[in-house]
């Protein structure tokens, strides 16, 4: 398993500031052997993950691969590729940009074989998606408070459970906040993950989600936790009164700890296509997102939507990285997003 997050050292005090009392340092997550590309455990696990990712994106990949079976590089090929990219939910803006980039690469490389264009397209997609590739940092504040949102069914609570496991295995003390009081059984589901990962949880039956979040952050500070994760209620962007409640949760978390939440993550279902982009836009307008998790890239998902998200970010000048992508229910099926790996899987 390669590193899921990295430790960011707290800022050093100013030279003329009085020395702060010594406090226990946040344990830096150890680098597992599989994190090294040359390590003996790296190859099997890495290849297994990539195989699952390729399988999950097979629907998109097969549609794109058919374009490169022709005998010539001509306007017909580019028209077929344009249709295939649009069918993959890449979106018109990203499609136009990728085609323009691809044509330039074909010209510069003097490529004459359609089969070789596929590799050039993979390189273009990699460069297009690279701004989305960043590592989640833990430790700039103690506790680091992560607020997680998403519509019902996106895999929000399951993602929190998986992330909690990896943080706990990295020697981080994690506290969960069951602030999803809107969905039936959400508190119980998060409780199962807390028990499974042997971490503490703050929950109130029928409690106000803002109050639960406030209590959790306060408890996290008192207990010396490294990370507090708030599982907020699933929302549809059209439910304005519920989106207002999410804004309130964020404000209340800020009252419990200055500068919090330090991360505001949105979990989106990769099967929802362009609707995923609409969700990102709506939640970002309400919460100013700091990161995304794209789940369920293991069936009918059209992976091109990540290109559409990247196009939107360029348009509005926002940097909202995709920290993780998921291809299944197993713990190892949630992995950090890598632009080059994703592009290769998309076009395999």
Image (spheres, grey):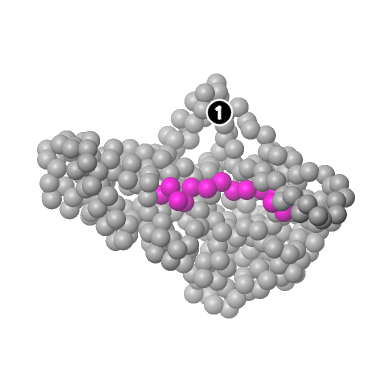
Crowding at label 1, few (<14), some or many (≥20) Cα neighbours within 10 Å? some
Residue 223 visible, this angle: no
What is the span of residues highlighted in magenta in the rendered image?
A: 129-141
Q: Is residue 131 magenta?
A: yes
Residue toward you, 348 or 32: 32
> Which residue is at the far top?
40
Residue 315's image quarter?
Answer: bottom left
Residue 172 visible, this angle: yes
- In the structure shown, which secondary structural element does the residue marked by tag 1 occupy? loop
Residue 105 image position (x, y, % from top left): 25, 43
The C terminus lies in which quarter of the figure? Answer: top left
Placement of 156 over or under 171, stated as above or below = below
Residue toward you, 310 or 220: 310
Residue 93 image position (x, y, % from top left): 31, 61
Residue 227 image position (x, y, % from top left): 71, 51
The residue at the point 49 percent across, 45 percent down is 337
Residue toward you, 317 or 92: 317
Placement of 71 over or under 265, stated as above or below = above
Residue toward you, 105 or 311: 105
> Which residue is at the far front?
16
Residue annotated with mark 1: 36
Is 205 left or right of 247, judged from the image as shown? right
How many numbered marks have been drawn onto this rendered protein structure?
1
The residue at the point 69 percent across, 57 percent down is 145
Residue 186's image quarter?
Answer: bottom right
The N terminus lies in which quarter of the figure? Answer: top right
The residue at the point 85 percent across, 51 percent down is 19
Residue 251 image position (x, y, % from top left): 68, 71
The residue at the point 61 percent across, 43 percent down is 5
> Which residue is at the far right?
21
Placement of 40 over or under 68, stated as above or below = above
């Amino acid at each position: 398993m390669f590193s899921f997050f990295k430790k960011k050292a707290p800022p050093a005090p100013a030279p003329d500031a009085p020395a702060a009392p010594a406090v226990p340092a946040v344990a830096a997550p150890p680098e597992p052997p599989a994190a090294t590309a040359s390590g003996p455990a790296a190859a099997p696990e890495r290849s297994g993950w990539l195989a699952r990712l390729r399988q999950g994106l097979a629907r998109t990949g097969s549609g794109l691969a058919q374009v490169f079976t022709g005998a010539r590089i001509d306007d017909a090929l580019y028209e077929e590729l344009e249709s295939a990219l649009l069918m993959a939910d890449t979106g018109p803006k990203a499609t136009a940009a990728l085609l323009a980039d691809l044509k330039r690469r074909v010209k510069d490389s003097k490529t004459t074989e359609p089969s070789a264009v596929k590799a050039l397209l993979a390189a273009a997609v990699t460069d297009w998606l690279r701004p989305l590739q960043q590592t989640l940092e833990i430790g700039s504040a103690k506790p680091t408070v992560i607020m997680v949102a998403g519509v019902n069914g996106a895999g929000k609570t399951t993602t929190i459970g998986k992330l909690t496991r990896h943080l706990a295995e990295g020697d981080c003390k994690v506290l969960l906040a069951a602030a999803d009081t809107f969905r039936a059984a959400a508190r119980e589901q998060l409780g199962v993950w807390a028990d499974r990962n042997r971490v503490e949880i703050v929950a109130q039956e029928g409690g106000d989600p803002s109050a639960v979040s406030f209590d959790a952050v306060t408890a996290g500070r008192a207990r010396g936790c490294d990370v507090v994760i708030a599982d907020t209620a699933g929302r549809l962007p059209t439910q304005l009164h519920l989106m207002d409640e999410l804004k309130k949760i964020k404000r209340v978390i800020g009252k419990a700890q200055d500068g919090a939440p330090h991360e505001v993550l949105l979990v989106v279902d990769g099967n929802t296509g362009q609707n995923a982009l609409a969700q990102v836009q709506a939640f970002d307008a309400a919460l100013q997102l700091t990161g995304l998790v794209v789940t369920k890239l293991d069936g009918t998902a059209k992976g091109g939507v990540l290109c559409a998200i990247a196009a939107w970010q360029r348009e509005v000048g926002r940097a909202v990285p995709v920290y993780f992508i998921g291809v299944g229910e197993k713990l190892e099926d949630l992995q950090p997003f890598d632009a080059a790996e994703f592009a290769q899987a998309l076009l395999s």
